[in-house]
Image: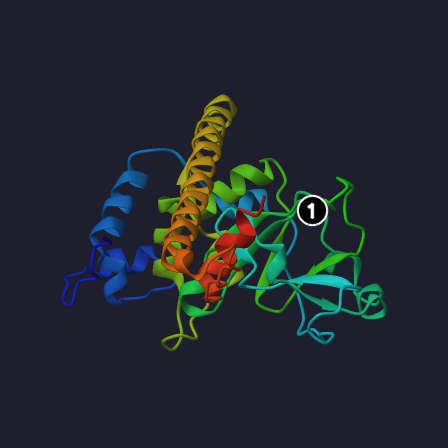
Amino acid sequence: MPTNLPLKATFSLRAVARNPTLRIDAKQADENAVHFDALLDRVETFYLGEFLPEPFVKGRQPNYLEEGQDEGALVLNTGAVRPLGITFGLCRRVSTEDFEQLSESRKLKDGDVLLTTDGGTSIGKAAVFQTPLSETGEPLDCGFTVDSHVAILRPSGISSTLLSYLLCSPMGQIQFQRAESGASGQTAVSEDDVRRFRFPKVSQAEFDAATATFTSALEEARRLEAEAFRTRQEGWNAFQDRLTATAGGEQRRIAARARPSETRMRQAFAG
């Protein structure tokens, strides 16, 4: 369980002054945040902005096509962007004409890092964009862009994979928590905030080793998650089959209720 934010905390003005946002809310004194500050004081660090030479590119509010249309460009929205993954089945479409009118910077390219920067609990999800493949194994060429709630980051000097890991890591998420501002449910994190995120600076070899270690763990976790999801579905099917066995013959199974979270799971582990 995550640590509850303190209801009361003592925070020195010197500590407040070190924070570029000058915020004094309780999140700044969260135990994990204070520990993270102490850690950064003991090591060499870098700012994320050092590896982001280009301004963040935000999408615009799309003029979506009607649901069910399978032609046109796909728009990646907050729901489609997951931590370290993209659920393309949750994207909606805009016309090819509308897509062609977009600036080149708003058209997604392989290796772009997508980041959700507003929307309460949706803040801080990051994933690397790679063009999805069709059923025949060919890259889809319909075109891809983002809506106004997703930013495109194009790093230089570090890999897109490492950038996404840093943003989604506990060290990155505690900084999102401290930087977000606004009314409940309508909070946001600015580009300047993200550029000021700090992380320990190590050699390129250490960065590469850390990335490889987590990539291996992530692949194994996804394999186990997919296996658990299929095992659960098979269990429900067996449960239903036993209850309907007295009806005789092979019965059509009742489809599961399409809850958003379960829909995302089915799409993520399809096949």
| Relative horizontal placement of residue 39, taking residue 88 as reference (left or right) | left
Question: Residue 260: horizontal and vertical position, in percent?
Answer: 48, 65
Q: Quadrant of the C terminus?
A: top right
- Front residue of this view, candidates 229 and 202: 229
Image point 48% across, 63% down: which residue?
254
Q: Which residue is mark 1?
A: 132
* Colouring rule applied to residues: rainbow
Kindly identify the residue that appears in the image at 23 percent across and 56 percent down.
Answer: 30
The kind of secondary structure element at disc 1 is: loop
Q: Residue at x 52, y 53 (%)?
A: 266
Residue 123 appears in view: no
Percent across and percent down for residue 14 are: 24, 57
Residue in view at x 34 percent, y 64 percent? 22
Residue 225, image x, y percentages: 42, 42
Q: Nearer the viewer, residue 148 or 225?
A: 225
Q: Is residue 242 above or below residue 21?
A: above
Question: Is any atom of residue 7 visible in this view?
Answer: yes
- Which of 24/85 is in front? 85
Query: Callout 1, which amino acid?
Result: Pro
Q: Is residue 203 above or below residue 133?
A: above
Query: Which is more toward the observer, 206 or 229?
Result: 229
Q: Taking 144 as reference, is 10 left or right? A: left
**Rendering quarter of residue 217:** top left
Residue 48: x %, y % from top left: 50, 46
Q: State the image quarter where residue 23 is shown.
A: bottom left
